[in-house]
Image (cartoon, rainbow, N blue to C red):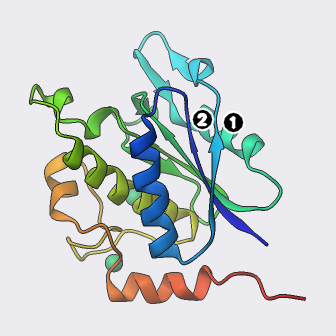
Amino acid sequence: MKFLYVGATPEVERGALEAVRDRMAAEFGLPVRELALPPIDFAWDAARRQYGSAEVLEMLMRACPGDGIKLLGVTGRDLFIPVLTFVYGHAQLGGRVAAISLARLRQEFYGLPPNREVLLERARKEALHETGHVFGLVHCADRQCAMSLSTNVGQIDRKRDAFCAGCAARLGRRAQPPPKE
Ligand SMILES: [Zn+2]
Ligand SMILES: [Zn+2]
C-alpha cells in the first residue's frame, strides 16, 4: 500500500491539517496519512525575516516515508524563494514533495478579523494546487480551477477547492494507485 502523506509543523492547528487531509483524500482518490514535521527554524533567513522554501522541501524529501507516494508539508511560517517576495507554496514539479504556508492565508495578515472558514478554504485550495504540481500538473487558464495561478488572496478566493475537468483527467492518468503485483 502506498500513501499520500500530509505533514504539519508544530505551530499548525489541528483543524487546518484535518481540512487539508480530508480534501486531499477526496480529490486525489488516494489513501492519506498524517506525519508530524519538525519546526522549520533551520530555514529562517534573518535578512528577509522569512523561511526559505527550498530548504523546507529538502527537509520534506528526507522526511517522506518509504511508503509515501508524495508528501505535502503544511507550515504556519511565511515562505519565500529568492526571486519572489513570498510564496503561498512551493512544489517539486513532477517530484515527490511540496509545501504550503498558512501565514498569508489568514485574514489577520491583512489587518482583518480572523475567519477560520476562510483560512481553511484557502488552505484546501493551496494544498490541492501545490500537490497537483507534484503530480505534474501545470498552471491552468480556468480561473476557478485549483491549478490556476494565484498571486493574491482575491485570486485564491475566486478558485474552487477542486480541479477543472481537464486537470482532473490529467491527474487521473498520473495519480492511479500502483498496480498490485
Ligand atoms: Zn502553481
Ligand atoms: Zn484546470
Q: Taking 115 as reference, is 50 left or right?
A: right
Residue 15, image x and y in percent? Answer: 40, 44
Quadrant of the rendered image holding ligand 1: bottom left
The residue drawn where x is 60% and y is 74% is 30
Q: Taking 53 as reference, is 31 left or right?
A: right
Residues under labels 2 and 1: Cα distance? 5 Å
Query: Hey, which residue is sitting farthest left in the picture?
Result: 112
Residue 56, image x and y in percent? Answer: 60, 35
The amino acid sitting under disc 1 is Met
Residue 173, image x and y in percent? Answer: 58, 88
As displayed, is residue 103 above or below residue 143?
above
The amino acid sitting under disc 2 is Val
The residue drawn where x is 73% and y is 49% is 64
Picture quadrant of residue 82 = top left
Q: In which quarter of the image is the C terminus?
A: bottom right
What secondary structure is found at the residue carrying circle 2? helix
Q: Which of 139 and 33 is in front in this view?
A: 33
The residue drawn where x is 76% and y is 82% is 178
Query: Hey, which residue is sitting farthest top in the picture?
Result: 46
The residue drawn where x is 54% and y is 78% is 29
Residue that carries the numbered disc 2 in the rendered image: 56
Asked if disc 2 and disc 1 are in contact, CB closer than 8 Å, the reply is yes
Residue that carries the numbered disc 1 in the rendered image: 59
Query: Hey, which residue is sitting farthest right in the picture?
Result: 181
The answer to whether residue 147 is visible is yes
